[in-house]
Amino acid sequence: MSRTAWRSKILHFNGDPAHSNDPDTVMAYNDGVLVVEDGHILALDTPEALTDMTRDIEVQHLPDSLIIPGFVDAHVHYPQVDIIGGYGEHLLDWLERYAFPAEIGLMNDKGKAEDTASFFLDELLRNGTTSALVFATVYAHTVDALFGEALKRNMRLISGKVMMDAHAPDALMDTAQSSYEDSKALIEKWRGKGRLGYAVTPRFALTSSEEQLNFAGLLLAENPDVLLHTHLCENKKEIERAAELFPTARDYVDVYKRAGLLTDRSVFAHCVHLSDDERADLAKAKSAIAFCPTSNLFLGSGLFDLETAGQAGITVGLGSDVGAGTSLSSFASMSEGYKVTQMREQTLSPLHAFYMATLGGARALHIDGHVGNFAPGKEADFLVLDLAATPLMKRRLGRANTFEEMLFALMILADDRAVRRTYVAGELAHDRDE
Ligand SMILES: [Zn+2]
């Protein structure tokens, strides 16, 4: 057995601080010790309380640091790392001009897909993201490439083959039947491998026939261990187009609902323009939302209503949505998320933001039984953050009077430079200073 311990400021969550008054919801230590054994959390407490447990091992003391669970990115597209920062479009034109060509670029090219996946996953780890729900492309080999690279890094990662059989470039289209068969084969091929999970991934209502959406629903029904991952109500023109394509559906959510895609294993990216009926449907089905602030601002899609989603009891994680999102860093998602709520005359407290970036995201992705906080027995995916990563951070965070003030300045000022180390299942996976 291998036992290791780290001493630092430590923060994690047992629940949603925006909607719970339980004193154990937020666990913040100004001086705590995290003990890991064989890749899993053994204990977390004050140094004094853990004297016996740490007597015979070296405790790594990390002043000026904060240890938190690894970030969870609840919505991101790996092939789009190559087109991040594409100028001048809103969603539908942006897809045509940037996203689709990038995805076509991986056609029949396993090596390029592996290279892109490898770069993408290293960037996630450099940014402190240890788990993510990831769009691949319509080509099955791009899922193989990502899963292969994630397996090498032992990451808890979820992805799936994009299903699209309508209103897209010919090179990116499958058929309803082939998308079912290819997805089924991928689920069987990767099930039980490492820490990987599968998500049935129709791109969105605009690029799938009703028959294909029904096949996606069949895959969900046949495989109780897989998620559903798609886009919903991101952009007003997209919503108008969905209404034209599915004239008998009550609304956009109903397009998915009729196909059996509105479930407690469904993760819908964006949901910027939900009606009250649609939001109520998501809440009733216990579906989750990936809030993607940097993308929603970059594409001018709109301002997500975080407060109302929370009041409805919907689980919300944070998504980078790269390449429409402008950063793989969860700090950027937290910071821009705060500004979105400000524009809506709502708020996003630092505790709520760090919760969404860790346990909230894990709950949205149904991986909270394994990761997301430091409950004993969980897999030890965690970060050592440098609270003095830049001269400005050192100066500002050093002047914080409370833990929450420090956290808020951190989420506003930090980026990948603040991620000193990333640990995956107790193993060092990224060291900034190496
Ligand atoms: Zn997306």
Image (cartoon, grey):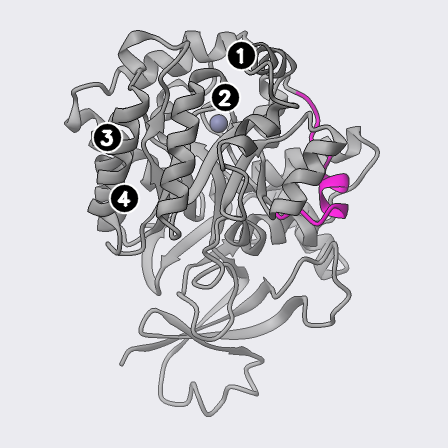
Secondary structure beneath dot 3 equals: helix
Instruction: Indicate whether 38 appears above or below 267.
Output: below
Question: Which residue carries the number 1 mark?
Answer: 245
Sequence-wise first label, 1 or 3: 3
Range of residues picked out in magenta: 302-315
Q: Under 8 Å from ligand 1: the CB of mark 2?
A: no
Secondary structure beneath dot 4 equals: helix
Q: CA distance from mark 4 to mark 3?
A: 11 Å
- Foreground residue, 140 or 245? 245
Classify 10 Å Cα crowding around label 2: few (below 14), some (14-19), many (20 and above): many
Instruction: Indicate whether 112 appears above or below 13.
Output: above
Looking at the rendered structure, which numbered label has been put on residue 187? 4
Classify 10 Å Cα crowding around label 1: few (below 14), some (14-19), many (20 and above): some
Q: Are marks 1 and 2 in contact (CB under 8 Å)?
A: yes
Q: CA distance from mark 1 to mark 3?
A: 27 Å
Question: Which residue carries the number 3 mark?
Answer: 140
Sequence-wise first label, 1 or 4: 4
